[in-house]
């Protein structure tokens, strides 16, 4: 067992020291907390997989503190990349580049000839990377299969005793992981995972962007068949409700009849309308506010584990803009289970 230290943002030097010693330290970003380790130290990277219980054939994102660093690790930096980095970095966009040979251990890239890189929009973490003097691998800092952490407390809950520290900078912003964009073929940029930067926003900068639906991978091995669902999963089953209050009432009656104790993961207006003593609510914010819903989704899924809810009914959002990423994560949590389907 390791003692998991909580580092505050005035203790970045101490946190960086742990990274240099080859230990894992969780870091805050604008999306979710990452599980950091020296990307150039194979032993340190292997500790990340151990701490998370993550299959080691799923490649990691390398977090850098400047756009200039990319050229050290990418074989080439195409013009599309320059445009995207100027427009969206630091920010929730991960770019997949062809990788220079022999820079990273196969555990970082899962032996692929590409590498994922991003510059997170969090001052403390950019400082941490600079102080450590090395880029950081950083999968989401949850136990594999669980919802990604959006607070230092979530990380502590999942990984205490397994990692050296957590750099605590409060709640994350976006609340869902970054958009992963494959630009290994610069003439055909393709979204592998929807996230904080929408397809529309990308297209305004670089023109047509493709979506590789079969590749959409959040915590999955790219192109891996099967294993598609059941990620981000709380202990309780999740059922998505797509409809008006009448549909919600039907869903509540249906599951209560089966003896379920229902957790309501819905907007605050709907909660106010449907609330009764039998229901356990967690608010996703104001009706129709997708930013707030994305920000709270993972915290909500985790919240019900601390209650006696046996089933979660969760609010659907229209699949446009950030709603695409929100529904992608919710469908995985729910095993794509919609009420009435
Ligand atoms: O917002 C985020 O991206 C967070 C924060 C901590 O930065 N990180 C994160 O990492 O979500 P992780 O490991 O949970 O997800 C990385 C995703 C996975 O779906 C992985 O398969 C994909 O990126 N990925 C990484 N390297 C890749 C590569 N070379 N080719 C294709 N997909 C890759
Ligand atoms: Mg993850």
Image (cartoon, rainbow, N blue to C red):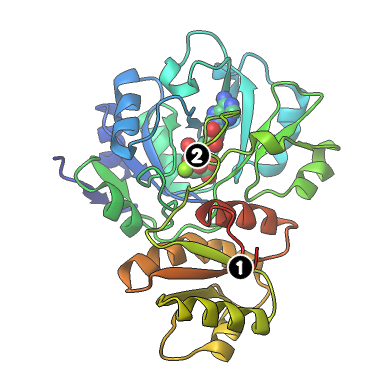
Q: Residue at x 41, y 91 (%)?
A: 277
As drawn, is 160 to the left or to the right of 219? left
Estimate how packed mark 2 is, as few (under 14), some (14 to 19) or many (20 or more) residues with alpha carbons within 10 Å: many
Mark 1 Cβ inside 8 Å of ligand 2: no
Along the line of sight, which residue is nearer the eye, 283 or 295?
Answer: 283
Mark 2 Cβ inside 8 Å of ligand 2: yes
| Nearest to viewer (mark 1 / mark 2) | 1
Total label count? 2
Q: Residue at x 73, y 64 (%)?
A: 318
Image: 113 above or below 121: above
Q: Residue at x 50, y 89 (%)?
A: 275
Along the line of sight, which residue is nearer the eye, 168 or 314?
Answer: 314
Quarter of the rendering occupied by the N terminus? top left
Residue 57, how many percent across, how many down?
Answer: 45, 24
Estimate how packed mark 1 is, as few (under 14), some (14 to 19) or many (20 or more) residues with alpha carbons within 10 Å: some
Q: Which mark is residue 6?
A: none
As drawn, is 279 to the left or to the right of 43? right
Element under disc 2 = loop
Q: Residue at x 79, y 27 (%)?
A: 188
Residue denoted by label 1: 339
Q: Quadrant of residue 315?
A: bottom right
């Amino acid at each position: 067992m390791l003692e998991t230290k909580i580092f505050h943002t005035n203790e970045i030097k101490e946190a960086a020291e742990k990274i240099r010693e080859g230990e894992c330290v969780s870091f805050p970003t604008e999306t979710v907390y990452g599980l950091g380790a020296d990307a150039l130290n194979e032993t340190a990277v292997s500790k990340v997989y151990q701490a998370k219980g993550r299959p080691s054939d799923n490649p990691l994102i390398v977090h850098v503190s400047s756009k200039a660093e990319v050229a050290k690790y990418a074989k080439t930096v195409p013009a599309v990349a320059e445009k995207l980095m100027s427009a969206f970095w630091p920010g929730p966009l991960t770019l997949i580049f062809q990788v220079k040979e022999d820079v990273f251990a196969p555990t970082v890239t899962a032996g692929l000839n590409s590498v994922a890189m991003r510059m997170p929009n969090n001052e403390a973490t950019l400082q941490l990377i600079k102080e450590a003097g090395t880029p950081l691998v950083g999968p989401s800092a949850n136990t594999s299969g669980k919802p990604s952490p959006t607070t230092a407390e979530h990380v502590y809950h999942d990984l205490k005793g397994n990692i050296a520290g957590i750099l605590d900078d409060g709640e994350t912003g976006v609340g869902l992981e970054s958009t992963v964009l494959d630009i290994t073929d610069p003439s055909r940029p393709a979204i592998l995972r929807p996230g904080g930067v929408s397809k529309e926003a990308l297209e305004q900068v670089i023109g047509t962007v493709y979506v590789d639906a079969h590749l959409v991978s959040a915590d999955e091995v790219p192109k891996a068949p099967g294993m598609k669902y059941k990620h981000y999963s709380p202990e309780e089953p999740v059922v998505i409700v797509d409809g008006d209050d009448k549909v919600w009432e039907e869903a509540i009656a249906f599951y209560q009849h089966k003896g379920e104790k229902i957790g309501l993961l819905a907007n605050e207006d709907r909660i106010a309308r449907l609330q009764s003593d039998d229901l356990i609510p967690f608010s996703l914010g104001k009706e129709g506010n997708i930013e707030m819903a994305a920000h709270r989704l993972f915290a909500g899924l985790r919240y019900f584990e601390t209650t006696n809810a046996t089933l979660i009914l969760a609010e659907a959002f229209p699949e446009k803009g950030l709603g695409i990423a929100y529904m992608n994560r919710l469908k995985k949590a729910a095993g794509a289970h919609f009420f009435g389907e």
